[in-house]
Amino acid sequence: MLGRELADALARRGLDCAGTDLDCDITDAAALDAFAAGRGFAWIVNCSAYTAVDKAEDDEARARAINAAGAGNLAAVAARLGAALIHVSTDYVFDGRASRPYDETDPVCPLGAYGRTKAEGERLVLQACPRAVVLRTAWLYGRHGQNFVGTMLRVMRERPLLRVVADQRGTPTHTATLCDVIAEIVVRGTLAPGIYHVTDGGETTWHGFASEIRDRAVELGLVPAACRVEPITTAEYPTRARRPAYAVLSKRKIVAWLGRELPPWRETLAAYLRAWAAEHPS
Ligand SMILES: NC(=O)c1ccc[n+]([C@@H]2O[C@H](COP(=O)([O-])OP(=O)(O)OC[C@H]3O[C@@H](n4cnc5c(N)ncnc54)[C@H](OP(=O)(O)O)[C@@H]3O)[C@@H](O)[C@H]2O)c1
């Protein structure tokens, strides 16, 4: 999802970018070296990951090979090339017990295998590459790949009533916001190595997110007005992996560097749905 959007976003800005997928397997260090040889990369952006949060509980070794060792391989390649690395990580490195937005310096304490392997990846990347930037993001949606917005739009067309978890807080984030920040980091080249939080602005629950999708989508004629979204608790919707109850990230470091706030999640969602409606006329 993020990788395709980023390749498009960088190309639109006239930046020369070699986008890869499984053709460049990050768990294969020799293949990465061979791919990078002689290409003079100045930046490497790691959007790849094992992202199936529930499946990772029963497949932790594979998740670790990609999210930790694979990320470390990329960082080592970047270090050998003298390139800078942008590595994307997640709010799920936290346990969600906080009652204020998580700071970059707060200790990580993941609840599940996905978060554990992503936290290990952060550590390996920062150790292996002196020019590494780790961007933690959250609740991503975008044009490519499966995501919550796409699932909600589909299910709202199929069913009159949806029940959505209302006791997990976080920030929906459009991939376009993150791609803008990544492009700015590359173009300006002045961001100090370290960890940064990048999400859209504000916070809500999955139920709040689904309700906003519903309201905007009804206005755009994408889903029936009769569709209702009912709040439920996490206990009523058990999943294999535990998720943090509170996963709001403080963006103070990146906001200070950008010199601007990141857009409120409701605004980016509304823009995304308008574009979606224009691309999918009924
Ligand atoms: N989605 C979210 O809500 C969310 C939230 C917070 C953070 N993040 C982070 O944001 C980043 C982007 O996530 P996303 O949502 O764009 O995930 P995604 O759509 O699942 O994309 C991850 C990509 O990595 C590829 N990949 C897996 N193993 C690989 C390997 N060994 N070598 C090369 N590529 C490999 C996957 O290919 P296959 O699909 O073929 O396996 C997939 O195309 C990840 O770091 C993720 O942890 C995501």
Image (spheres, helix red, strand yellow):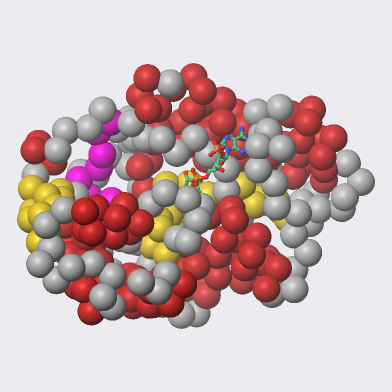
Q: Is residue 207 magenta?
A: no
For residue 275, above or below residue 253: below
Please, what is the dominant secondary structure of the magenta stretch? loop
Taking the spot 9% from the left edge, 44% from the top edge, the residue there is 233
Residue 92 quadrant: top left
Q: Which residues are magenta?
A: 241-247
The quarter of the image holding the C terminus is bottom left
Residue 245 within the magenta-colored segment of the rendering: yes
Point out the residue furthest to the right here.
38
Please provide percent x and percent y for residue 232: 8, 48
Q: Is residue 82 left or right of residue 8?
A: right
* Residue at screen point 26% across, 39% down: 243
Left or right position of 116 against 192: left
Q: Residue at x 40, y 58 (%)?
A: 141
| Horizontal side, residue 217 vs residue 177: left or right | left
In the image, residue 31 above or below residue 231? above
Q: State the image quarter where residue 229 is shown.
A: bottom left
| Residue nearer the viewer, 240 or 257 | 240
Residue closest to the eye, 167 or 258: 167
What percent of the width, then of the height, locates residue 86? 62, 53
